[in-house]
Image (spheres, rainbow, N blue to C red):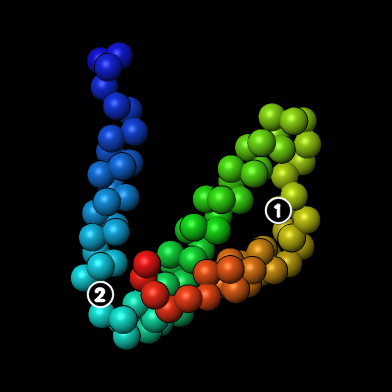
Amino acid sequence: MPNQDVLLPLKNSFHEFIDLLELLSDEQFVSPMHGWSPKGVVSHLAGWNRLMIDAALSILASKTPVYYEDAPNNYSSINAGFMANYASHSKE
């Protein structure tokens, strides 16, 4: 077991997710369903993943993660920033 890649299930799920996104047409990628488009979901996931890396580094430095400052806004400023940072309609 020590030689097993413990992240393999996560890596496989990630690749399955990417494969599904690639099946979508450009129109489907940007069209909302139940309030979210696939592009919006991808932007959200990419942004929060990057933010959690910064948060972990803050915690290791005994600091409060910066994203807590947006908690009173229900993190809407952060989420809007993700959409702006990942504004491209390209799946790439």
State the residue in front, 33 or 66: 66
On the rendered structure, is 39 left or right of 10?
right
Percent of width and height locating residue 44: 51, 63
Q: Secondary structure at mark 2?
A: loop
Amino acid type at mark 1: Tyr
Locate residue 29, reporting x and y percent: 34, 77
User: In the image, what residue occupies the spot 77% across and 41% down?
Assistant: 64
How many labels were placed on the picture? 2
- The residue drawn where x is 52% and y is 50% is 49
71 up-or-down from 40: above or below:
above
**Residue ranking furthest to the top:** 2
Residue in the picture at 63% in, 37% down = 56
Who is closer to the viewer here, 42 or 91? 91
How packed mark 1 is, by other alpha carbons closer than 10 Å (few <14, some 14-19, many 20 or more), is some
Pointer 2: residues within 10 angstroms few (<14), some, or many (20+)? few
Q: Which residue is mark 2?
A: 24
Residue type at tag 2: Leu
Against 83, residue 70 (above or below) is above
The image quadrant where one finds the N terminus is top left
Q: Position of residue 68 (x, y in %)?
A: 73, 52
Name the mark nearer the viewer: 2 or 1: 2
At 33% across and 41% down in the image, what residue appears?
10
Residue 61 visible, this angle? yes
Residue 65 relative to residue 21: left or right = right
Q: Residue 55 or 84: which is nearer the viewer?
A: 84
Q: CA distance from mark 2 to mark 1?
A: 32 Å
SS class, disc 1? helix
21 left or right, relative to 89: left
Circle 2/circle 1 CB separation < 8 Å: no
**Where is residue 26 shown, x and y percent of the image?**
31, 81
Q: Check residue 67 in the rendering and tell me which mark sits there, or answer none.
A: 1
